[in-house]
Image: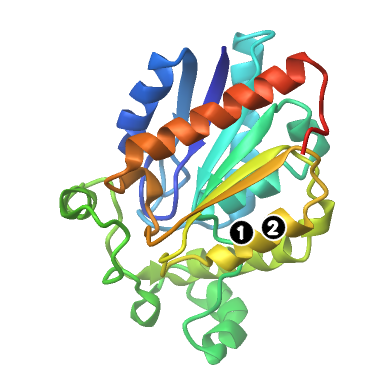
Amino acid sequence: MGILLIIHGLNEHGGRYADFARQLTSCNFGVYAMDWIGHGGSDGLHGYVPSLDHVVADTGAFLEKIKSENPGIPCFLFGHSTGGAVVLKAASYSHIEEMLEGIVLTSPALRVKPAHPIVGAMAPIFSVVAPKFQFKGANKRGIPVSRDPAAMLAKYSDPLVYTGPIRVRTGYEILRISSYLMRSFRSVTVPFFVLHGTADKVTDPLASQDLYNEAASKFKEIKLYDGFLHDLLFEPEREEIGQDIINWMEKRLSASLGNVDNIW
């Protein structure tokens, strides 16, 4: 029916989405996942991302490979949190957008603010001088990301999940891509579905609403989950959320087959 390429969020890895992948395959979707540089099983210092533009480029290259190996099969991109920012930026390039039927964003990192204004001012300098330095003041480790205690335990006991303080260059790259995207909402044309929990304390659900309101995309949808936290696919209601994503992709494919691109 279609293929979904999963781009994980900061500090985690693609293997965490195995349950979601099983749900997708049971509905006849193929699934691929990619670990960013410095994350999961990929090369590089753990938790260190020299440039999120590298992750954007890798996403485009991997998507191209998937398309060449699966000719004629419609493809979607999924991104969580900072992975959502990566996916949105990737889809802003016409050569990537034309390979896609649409994108799905969960809790995207769109209006990221530095821990303190002085951090924002100094980040560009420190990202060059001490890019790998671990900045303890910006660590969000203590913020709950799921209402499921077992999911929280599994995440932070996973050896492939980076649990140290954020590295300076990595943090600066998140501020940089977030700032770029906030200025570019009106030029977004790719079909998209954005999902966010209203109680998310890591990324801003109001920024997702702004994306939905301002984007030029003709085929777009938003769903805000009342009281849900950041890691939507690890919340107790993960199966229903997964089904919402599958339903949207099926709706998108039906519209695409019928050549109807302005049903909203």
The residue depicted at 47 percent of the width and 72 percent of the height is 168
Amino acid carrying label 1: it is: Ser
Q: Secondary structure at mark 2?
A: helix
Q: Secondary structure at mark 1?
A: helix
Amino acid carrying label 2: it is: Leu
Q: In terms of image quadrants, where is residue 134? A: bottom left
Per the rendering, the mark at residue 211 is 2
| Image vertical order of residue 257 relative to residue 196, above or below | above
Work out whether residue 176 or residue 42 is closer to the camera in this orientation and state it.
Answer: 176
Left or right relative to 147: residue 10: right
Name the residue at the bottom extreme. Answer: 118
Identify the residue under disc 1. Answer: 208
Do the numbered discs 2 and 1 sit on residues whose CB atoms are within 8 Å?
Answer: yes
Work out whether residue 249 or residue 94 is closer to the camera in this orientation and state it.
Answer: 249
The x, y position of residue 215, in whole percent, is 78, 53
| Image vertical order of residue 252 relative to residue 209, above or below | above
- Measured in 3D between alpha carbons, the distance from the residue under mark 2 to the one under mark 1, in whole angstroms, is 5 Å
The x, y position of residue 145, in whole percent, is 32, 60
Residue 30 appears in view:
yes
Left or right relative to 64: residue 15: left
Q: In terms of image quadrants, where is residue 192? A: top right
Please say which color scheme the image uses. Answer: rainbow
